[in-house]
Image (spheres, helix red, strand yellow):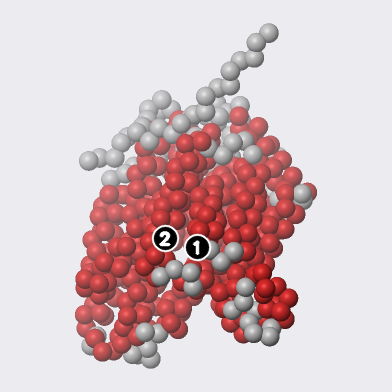
Amino acid sequence: MTTADPAPQPRLDLRHGTQRVFAHLLVSNAVVFVINYTVWFAITFWVFLETRSVFATGMIAGIFVVATAATGIWFGSLVDNYRKRTVMQVSALVSAGVYAACLALYLLTPPEAFGDVTSWQLWVFIVALMLGVIAGNPRAIALPALVTLLVPEDRRDRANGLVGTVTGSSMLVTSVISGVLVASGGMLHVLLLALVVLTASVVHLARVPVPEPVPGESPPANPGGGAGPGDTPRDGSGDAAPGSGGGAGGVDLRGTWRLVRGVPGLVPLIAFSCFNNFIGGGFMALMDAYGLSLVSVQVWGLLWGGLSALMIVGGLLVARWGLGSRPVRLLLLVNVAAWTATMLFPLASSIVSLTVAMAVFMLLMPFAEAAEQTVLQRVVPYERQGRVFGFAQSVEQSAAPITAFLMGPLTQFVVVPFMSGDGAGAQAIGSWFGTGQARAIALVFVITGAAGLVVTLLALASPQYRRLSASYAAAQRSSSAGQGLVEASVGLAAGLPADVPVPEARR
């Protein structure tokens, strides 16, 4: 008796049907992300050049992170309660409107006002620009939900890998574009380019048909009848079960929390990501200072450009290989490898060990992000995914600014004296670990990396991990009978014949 060869893993087909629609949305998001991040980076560079104030540049980063955490749940409710393409279009239009107002302010304000860190014109300009950047965030929530709608279940992990590639490529080119624009014409060229690009993105997306069900309803993922993937759980009366589906109007935080809590292991997954961001904020706050203690600013900038390119490679690897049948386990194993690397590299004061560790981290992060999105897309009903993605974004992002703002003073006033001169740390381990500011930062990295590794290993051994894995496997089994092509399901939801592909975008 011979064993049949395993079926080949399906590949994405971005040239036909709803997967082509996903490709258009992916490109649209990539372009908008690049221009919004360019504005963010450019205002940071420009403000520092104008004022030489580290306080001002730190406030810009703080405004972005805090606003992202504060608006995630609300933006998620917008994604669920309105058509997702409409939300993406309005997001771009709002950003464009804000940038147009900022352009007028920039042209009407005397240049010397922008060189004074106490100038009200400067801070109105900064806050307004950051609001324009934040207005683009609903797109980041809508796209994973549209992956659920447009991509067959057995290919969603690969689609999520492409989403990670877009994120990596956006960060790679943004710093270069923003630096060139600020050098050539200050914020004038940045804002002009932003208005042109956002207008073009609105025109492009208006010509891309996105067949969506009525907001608040699930797409009929199993046209043949029965429960399909993403179908709303129902009680005996045939109505939507409380807290499980049926998009309630407004933010509906209580219903979203009931849904998140109702999926075994989902709350611990979000809490785990929140903890990762919490300790990751320490790396964000201290990494530049550590790297610049080892190499020149020119080398450091080029190094991070190359490391950012590895995020693109990681995303493409996910798109090529997928995540396998156990993405929850993969998510935790990726974190084991990443935290091990970040714990070990500071043991030696070497740019080589730093580069190797950051290369591992950047290469693996798209796997972790795609795994989390794939799990949420599987276990959360489609009509609630916007709010759950927004909830996860708010909770996870809220942790990073805490350590980003606290780690600098803590390191400067506690750890540096501990590792310098007659400090207890310098006396105890200074002979082999080293002393001074750079080695104090290295000690912080070792401790935070070890904490991340321990928590990840505990998560792997936890019953919550097994429950979430079981939830994912159960959702996978329940959908396998009605797998079908999502193109057919979405076509039915849009009133199209099941065997007719979604029309291509008009040229």
Near mark 2 (Cα within 10 A), the count class, few <14, some 14-19 or many ≥20, is: some
Figure quadrant of residue 353: bottom right
Earlier-in-chain disc, 1 versus 2: 2
Q: Residue 135: x, y in percent? A: 40, 65
Quick one: 243 or 462, which is closer to the camera?
Answer: 462
Instruction: Say if residue 219 shows up in the picture.
Output: no
Q: CA distance from mark 1 to mark 2?
A: 10 Å
Residue at left offset 53%, top offset 61%: 354
The amino acid sitting under disc 1 is Ile
| Nearer-the-camera pick, 506 or 352 | 352
Q: Which mark is residue 306?
A: none
Q: Position of residue 198 (x, y in %)?
A: 29, 59
**Residue 201 drawn above or below residue 473:** below
Q: Secondary structure at mark 2?
A: helix
- The residue that disc 2 covers is 303
Q: Residue at x 44, y 42 (%)?
A: 316
**Amino acid type, mark 2:** Leu
Residue shown at 61% from the left, 26% from the top:
481
**Residue 30 in view of the camera:** yes
Could you tell me which secondary element the residue under label 1 belongs to? Answer: helix
**Are dots 1 and 2 in contact, CB under 8 Å?**
yes
Q: Residue 351, labelled with which disc? A: 1
